[in-house]
Amino acid sequence: MTKVPELFGSKVFNDQVMHERLPGTTYKALKKTIENGEPLDISVANVVANAMKDWAVEQGCTHFTHWFQPMTGVTAEKHDSFIQPCGDGVIMEFSGKELIKGEPDASSFPSGGIRATFEARGYTTWDPTSPAFVKDGSLYIPTAFCSYTGEVLDKKTPLLRSMERLSAEAVKILHLLGKTDVTRVATTVGPEQEYFLVDKDLYEQRVDLKLTGRTLFGAKAPKGQELEDHYFGSIKTRVAAYMKDLDEELWKLGILAKTKHNEVAPSQHELAPIFSTSNIATDHNELTMEVMQKVAERHNLVCLLHEKPFKGVNGSGKHNNWSITTNTGENLLSPGKHPESNTQFLLFLAAIVKAVDEYQDLLRITVASAGNDHRLGANEAPPAIISMYLGDDLDALVQSIINGGSYESHGKERMHTGVDVLADFKKDNSDRNRTSPFAFTGNKFEFRALGSSLNIACPNYMLNTMVADELAQFYEALKDAEDLEAAAKALIRETLTAHRRIIFNGDNYSDEWVAEAERRGLLNLKSLPEAMQHFMTEKNISLFVRNNIISEEELRARCEIELETYAKQISIEAMTMVDMAKKDILPAVTAYIRELTETALAKKALSESISVKAELDLINALTDKQEQFAALTAELQDEIAAASLIADNQEAATAYREKVFAKMEELRAVGDSIEEETAAEFWPYPSYTDLLFGV
């Protein structure tokens, strides 16, 4: 068996490989670009490209691809071979120009109207901060993506810009506080990834899973997650074999896969990595989702990344653990032993509290999707109301600052087990609130509202930008202060007092919190169409424009893309339901009713005294439901047709939510009721019992 240290990063053109293969001057120049953002000379790019090509060919590669993240929510790639003509044969070459710039078609990706069909040219450009890697016989080069006219068409570029903005503003604050040795600040992310595994043979029999990623019909299984026996339970042999292969494939790609376990729902699992910088964490998470699905195929499994593949059991999310660290190794979100006197920590905490309160709409928008609308607010995910959890100890400190009272930290108390053989240990000074959308967990914030299939670039560039903007305001308020410590304390108190409404340490699932949040003036945006109405406000446009993250036109394009995508997803789901209803479910019910009728007639033919009450009751019940089901199917078709005629994306998305999706829910309720009364041999699809317990 290959040792993990030897396996780890073996498919990555990482720092060690660059140090070994690049001339010293080239290596130093490239490191300056990566670490300090200095421009990269074409002569340096040529040397790097040649070394990259030689290394990749040794790994068995024949092609390279610029790997980018368009507004589809998934990654994209176009593969070119290294071959160049040479006499009657070919040689393997790769130039700096090819490394730096690629040219995919820009018109066929979502652009929100920025690119018309006839305006096809787009560019990809190398992102040297994210290492190239080898996969499936190709060299993968992480890149950004823009249009011929320069508009940003991807998720990576705003993320990189936001990281630079936050770094610049955080460094200015730290220099004010005397930390002049800090030259760069980075945001780090550890995205926990939840997913389902189902048997591939069963999956192939479910057209809804294949086309939409979730079951559109499906009666609840007799057993679900009621016994809470799957969570952290013993991992099944087949799943354990999958997880082992997955770990090894991820480690080869330099992905710090750390934790694996069963999640709450049957057939649901989780993988968690160690923290990386936001950019690399985003690339790695996109790779993780792809590798999850490919490795599943080897085990005759399918990995489902939809937020709610099964009704009635927990859906899947992606917890975004976000922190801020300096190039000197300091975590700026670490309170230290005496947070009450840690002005640096309190300044950054106050900036984050202010940002989350002022831009709660953006945080909700960035996790909105057709899939995630199913789970936000259920007893498995935070609600659609954005709030912050600080923990009892830190919340007490905040309240003492606001009220001008005294504060004494409890520190880490010793946990006494009461069993001699078990060691006592120090417990954390705060609990974990799994109902909170944005929870402080020691030295980081856990943004828990992300859906499992989401590209994490969006929530992170919005989070980085809003915090950077608040830090910029703090710097302006403090830079000329005669007594910096007093001014900082006054600013912290003023900020926390003004934005205390966003802090909530209680049960976010409770009805009382919904009412309390409304009293506080917090938003409760329950669906994507509702949330997107808050996107293009002057406040939000100004945030991104003044921080040079994206232009107003690019922001508007993203709004249009999200609305259009939502409408298309609901439309595909609705049309799939109609197809399933008409081609499979109605014929199946008809066949079963016919069987029941023939059975009843046969019993009567045998003897008039034989009771056929059971058959008649079931025939009548199913016939009534069959008629209702057929009528609802026709009504759903009408709603789809009406929604498809709406030109405005906001109106269309709202119609798909309020009319089409509502009718889908009605149709499903009747369909699932029919499944419960139809013999298994007649039902056209594998049941929830088969799917959830078939691995």
Image (tube, rainbow, N blue to C red):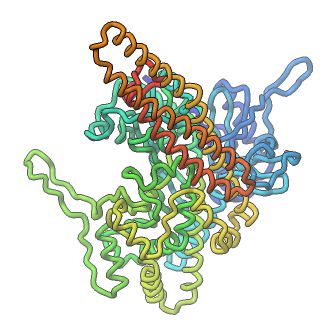
Q: Quadrant of residue 430?
A: bottom left
The answer to whether one can see residue 628 in this image is yes
Q: Nearer the viewer, residue 184 or 664?
A: 664
Residue 572 image point, x, y percent: 63, 39
At 41% across and 18% down in the image, what residue appears?
596
Q: Nearer the viewer, residue 495 or 518?
A: 518
* 406 up-or-down from 660: above or below: below
Looking at this rendering, what residue extends furthest in the right direction? 87
* 329 up-or-down from 222: above or below: below
User: Quick check: 275 left or right of 161?
Assistant: left
Looking at this rendering, what residue extends furthest in the top direction? 606
* 562 up-or-down from 132: above or below: below
At 36% across and 39% down in the image, what residue appears?
265
Position of the N terminus by quadrant: top left
User: Quick check: 168 left or right of 673?
Assistant: right
At 30% across and 75% down in the image, what residue appears?
396
Q: Quadrant of residue 583?
A: top right
Residue 462 image point, x, y percent: 59, 62
Q: Nearer the viewer, residue 134 or 394?
A: 394
Residue 385 image point, x, y percent: 46, 64
At 42% across and 71% down in the image, what residue appears?
517
